[in-house]
Image (cartoon, grey):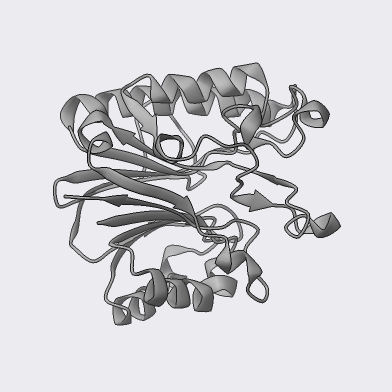
């Protein structure tokens, strides 16, 4: 079974890329972030033509999340207790016996900014939600664009970034708190090296020069850790014409 996540930075623009990647990579589940579409504009028919069902929670111009799956998606959640947030950043659904939680974590903008404060508040509420989900569901996957680098290996220039946004100790502690509910960073089960990124800035030839960050993660519970066989970053779509600034990340499980 293959589960993937991809911040597409506008599904309207990137739909042909998503269709191409679905045809080539053939994931069983694909979580999307930054769809930037209201629900009435979501291309459910085009996705269905590829053999996928879909659930989605979107808004005009900003944010938006979706989950595509070959099997039925049930028990859908778009809002969580304790978080009054009109931004569409959270989507959970059950596929078979696996609970999937898709997150598009708040960017935070800059240290000291009100959006940074809200990012930490948002992550704390999500942590509570995931703790409850983990208590109910043995097979749990939490994936998406986390907008946090776990450690210095995930930053192209740790000295220059220092403790700036995405790398500040409070953000890293908040991400660790999500892991502490009983989750594992699937990529690090197979890849310990530095310099392996999932996002590159459009500016300054960021992709060609590998000036990137690893901020797209697939976290898995103990029950799935022993079933994981590979976890990769697929850089190929980042080379396509008019790409997203993110690459898909994918996990394979032997079920």
The residue at the point 20 percent across, 33 percent down is 223
Quadrant of the frame with the N terminus: bottom left
In the picture provided, is 218 more to the left or to the right than 138?
right
In the picture provided, is 68 more to the left or to the right than 153?
left
Which is nearer the eye, 216 or 194?
194
- Residue 20: in sight, yes or no? yes
- The x and y percentages for residue 182 are 31, 23
Which is nearer the eye, 210 or 116?
210
- The x and y percentages for residue 25 are 39, 69
- Residue 65: in sight, yes or no? no
In the picture shown, does residue 251 fall above or below 175?
below
- The x and y percentages for residue 138 are 17, 32
- The x and y percentages for residue 93 are 26, 48
Question: How many numbered discs sit on the rendered protein?
Answer: 0
In the picture provided, is 60 more to the left or to the right than 113?
left
Q: Quadrant of residue 219?
A: top left
In the picture provided, is 210 more to the left or to the right than 154?
right
């Amino acid at each position: 079974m293959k589960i993937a996540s991809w911040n597409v930075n506008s599904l309207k623009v990137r739909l042909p890329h998503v269709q191409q990647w679905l045809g080539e990579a053939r994931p069983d589940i694909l979580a999307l972030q930054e769809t930037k579409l209201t629900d009435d504009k979501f291309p459910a028919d085009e996705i269905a033509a590829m053999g996928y069902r879909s659930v989605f929670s979107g808004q005009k111009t900003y944010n938006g999340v979706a989950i595509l799956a070959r099997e039925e998606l049930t028990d859908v959640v778009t809002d969580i207790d304790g978080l009054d947030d009109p931004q569409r950043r959270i989507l959970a659904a059950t596929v078979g016996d696996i609970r999937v939680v898709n997150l598009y974590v708040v960017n935070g903008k800059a240290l000291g900014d009100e959006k940074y404060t809200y990012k930490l508040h948002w992550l704390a509420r999500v942590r509570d939600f995931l703790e409850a989900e983990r208590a109910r569901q043995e097979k749990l996957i939490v994936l998406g664009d986390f907008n946090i680098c776990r450690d210095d290996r995930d930053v192209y220039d740790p000295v220059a970034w220092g403790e700036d946004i995405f790398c500040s100790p409070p953000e890293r502690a908040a991400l660790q708190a999500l892991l502490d509910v009983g989750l594992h960073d699937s990529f690090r089960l197979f890849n310990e090296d530095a310099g392996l990124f999932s996002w590159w800035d459009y500016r300054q030839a960021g992709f060609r020069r590998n000036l990137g960050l690893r901020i797209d993660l697939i976290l898995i519970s103990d029950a799935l850790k022993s079933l994981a066989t590979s976890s990769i970053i697929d850089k190929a779509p980042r080379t396509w014409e008019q790409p997203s600034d993110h690459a898909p990340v994918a996990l394979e499980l032997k079920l």
